[in-house]
């Protein structure tokens, strides 16, 4: 590190000055120095010479460190979406071997004709697990250029505008040569993050990748769950690049995409000659055997954990579960989590009594209905419970980013902690003591938000309604917590979490997002908004500065301005001065 290098330099200078003084003193003696004195002088000289080598090495290390630090600082301008794959599931060993082998063969093929592979399949068919397994294998081989996985419930991982920058940032870690080329592109065009995606694609991907030698082997870029990257309209420019511009990447670059079979993705990719399309076959013998293997493995774990009989649950039960899964791995994994609850024997009987379904989606819907009915049995008739369930699940579904149960409690002002309900839904939700509440699979959100699929008003979630409710909750919370002298805090010694609680942080960063998607019943939010804009707009700007979100403040207020122009022109007129302060016009 730098401190060690500076220490070496100081020692070298001290030794050099001491040796220089000693050698001069010996030469100034009136008589010739003795042999021992001469030997000692040259010994000291060799000692300093050795230190000189240390000095050279230290200087070289210091230069390298400063260069790396400079590049890191430059690359941070890209502001990539954070991608932590450490908690993502991989395929159970011994399963999906055929499709994994097929993808691996495509990735290492020398053919330049099919450089983009699109793997499509139903929700819950195991696409993300496959992509994570492929990514891990390629990383071990040194062939993974980037792994970007989209998620509709994490805002930064659902924005098409972030994709090229995130891929470029990961490529910079893949190769020092690419790292330098990308840094040069940023230096040349400092505002490249605000440039059109096509320009970013050329300057941050095509040109830097061309600096790599073609003899180095394939470099694979993985985009998982592309259907969760914004709306069809939002991702249109990105799809255009992937379909038409990806052919201009070097021939050794491969792009692997997974998604549901959405119409816009299909229209963009299916007619391209360089695109290879594969679909996961849920009814194939291989897929059935893989799910059977999955059930055997998980049932063995449940049997061991719960000290059940050695022959539990038996082959007939496992085969029945396999048939009910209808080819969906998400059905299998959800069923296993449900069975591994308080009473595995009873829970297994509950799942098996669900009967057979004619399609994969109906099988999944039936399982979710079973899980909800059984998780909170005999309580659904309680109207207060139903109200809390819908409020909590509605908040989880529409939140811009996953939030903790404590934040849900704070924003919704719940009398009974939300964990009471959340903890009963472990087969479909994940909640740790300190982390956010997450839906384990997007298909559960689809199920709850579709009245026809969920089959009951008991657990149907009207996402438009709950978005309006959360907008009001966020604004009401800010009206309560934002004060004058808001910034009387020791900011230099406190972290963001210590300064602003999570609920306040979420409300600050997300209230405008929730407001701006309201298209009806705007009166629902206007009264609270009027009070907030009058009393706390400037305090909110301060809070955003504390959160280091000043860059997004102007963009957010501009969106609010556009929304008010249509939905609240009176409010816009009343608060024009405050909004103008929040969106300063640059001077010439």
Image (cartoon, grey):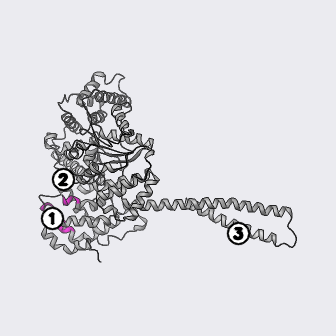
2 or 1: tag closer to the N-terminus: 2
Seen from the viewer's position, the closer of residues 342 and 224 is: 224
Q: Is residue 524 magenta?
A: yes
Q: Secondary structure at mark 3?
A: helix
Cα separation between marks 2 and 3: 75 Å
* Position above or below: 101 against 253: above
Residue at the spot 34% in from the left edge and 31% down from the top edge: 98
Q: Earlier in the sequence, mark 2 or mark 3?
A: 3
Membership of 508 in magenta stretch: no
Q: Report the quarter where the C terminus lies.
A: bottom left
* Mark 2 → mark 1, Cα distance in angstroms: 16 Å
Left or right of 13? Residue 411 is: left
Give the x, y percent position of residue 461.
17, 47
User: Mark 1: few, some, or many residues within 10 Å (few <14, many ≥20)?
Assistant: some
- Secondary element under disc 1, as helix, strand or loop, is helix
Neighbourhood count class around disc 3 (C-alpha, 10 Å): few under 14, some 14–19, many 20 upward:
few
Q: CA distance from mark 1 to mark 3?
A: 76 Å
Q: Nearer the viewer, mark 2 or mark 3?
A: 3
Name the quarter where the N terminus is drawn: bottom right
Is there CB contact under 8 Å for labels 2 and 3?
no
Report the mark closest to the observer, 1 or 3. 3
Magenta region: 513-532
The percent coordinates of residue 227 (x first, y second) are: 25, 46
> Dot 1 corresponds to which residue?
526
Q: Are marks 2 and 1 in contact (CB under 8 Å)?
A: no
Q: Position of residue 163 (x, y in %)?
A: 31, 53
Q: Which mark is residue 466?
A: 2
On residue 17, which mark appears?
A: 3
Classify residue 215 by image quadrant.
Answer: top left
Name the side, left or right, on which 13 lies relative to 163: right
């Amino acid at each position: 590190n730098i401190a060690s290098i500076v220490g070496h330099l100081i020692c070298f200078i001290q030794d050099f000055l001491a040796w220089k003084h000693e050698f001069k003193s010996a030469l100034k003696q009136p008589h010739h120095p003795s042999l021992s004195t001469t030997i000692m002088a040259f010994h000291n000289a060799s000692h300093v010479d050795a230190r000189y080598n240390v000095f050279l090495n230290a200087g070289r290390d210091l230069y390298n460190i400063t260069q790396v630090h400079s590049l890191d600082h430059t690359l941070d301008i890209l502001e990539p979406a954070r991608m932590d794959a450490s908690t993502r599931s991989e395929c159970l060993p011994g399963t999906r071997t055929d499709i994994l082998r097929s993808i691996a063969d495509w990735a290492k093929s020398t053919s330049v004709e099919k450089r983009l592979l699109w793997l499509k399949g139903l929700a819950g068919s195991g696409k993300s697990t496959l992509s994570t397994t492929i990514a891990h294998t390629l990383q071990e081989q040194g062939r993974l250029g980037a792994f970007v996985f989209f998620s509709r419930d994490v805002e930064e991982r659902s924005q098409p505008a972030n994709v090229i920058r995130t891929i470029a940032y990961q490529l910079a870690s893949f190769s020092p040569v690419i790292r330098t080329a990308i840094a040069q592109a940023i230096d040349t065009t400092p505002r490249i993050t605000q440039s059109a995606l096509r320009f970013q694609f050329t300057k941050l991907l095509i040109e830097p990748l061309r600096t790599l030698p073609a003899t180095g082997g394939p470099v694979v870029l993985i985009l998982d769950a592309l259907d969760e990257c914004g709306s069809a309209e939002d991702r249109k420019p990105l799809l255009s690049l992937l379909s038409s511009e990806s052919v201009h990447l070097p021939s050794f670059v491969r792009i692997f995409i997974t998604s549901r079979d959405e119409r816009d993705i299909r229209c963009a990719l299916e007619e391209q000659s360089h695109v290879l399309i594969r679909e996961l076959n849920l009814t194939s013998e291989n897929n059935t055997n893989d799910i059977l293997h999955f059930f055997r493995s998980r049932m063995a774990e449940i049997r061991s954990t719960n000290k059940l009989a050695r022959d539990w649950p038996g082959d007939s039960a496992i085969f029945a579960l396999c048939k009910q899964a209808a080819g969906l791995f998400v059905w299998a994994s959800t069923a296993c989590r449900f069975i591994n609850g308080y009473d595995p024997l009873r829970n297994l009987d509950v799942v098996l009594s669900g009967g057979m379904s004619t399609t994969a989606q109906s099988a999944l819907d039936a399982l979710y209905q079973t899980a909800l009915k059984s998780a909170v049995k005999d309580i659904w008739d309680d109207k207060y419970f139903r109200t809390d369930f819908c409020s909590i699940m509605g908040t989880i579904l529409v939140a811009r980013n996953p939030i903790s149960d404590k934040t849900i409690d704070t924003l919704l002002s719940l009398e009974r902690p939300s964990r009471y309900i959340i903890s009963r839904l472990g087969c479909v939700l994940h909640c740790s003591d300190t982390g956010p509440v997450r839906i384990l699979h997007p298909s559960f959100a689809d199920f709850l938000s579709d009245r026809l699929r969920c089959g009951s008003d008991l657990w149907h979630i009207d996402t438009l309604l709950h978005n309006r409710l959360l907008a009001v909750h966020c604004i009401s919370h800010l009206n309560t917590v934002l004060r004058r002298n808001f910034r009387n805090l020791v900011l230099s010694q406190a972290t963001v979490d210590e300064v602003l609680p999570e609920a306040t942080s979420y409300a600050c960063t997300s209230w405008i997002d929730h407001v701006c998607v309201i298209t009806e019943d705007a009166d629902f939010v206007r009264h609270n908004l009027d009070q907030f804009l009058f009393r706390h707009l400037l305090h909110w700007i301060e809070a955003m500065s504390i959160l280091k979100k000043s860059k997004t403040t102007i963009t957010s207020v501009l969106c609010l301005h556009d929304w008010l122009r249509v939905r609240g022109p009176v409010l816009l007129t009343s608060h024009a001065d405050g909004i103008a302060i929040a969106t300063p016009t640059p001077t010439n």
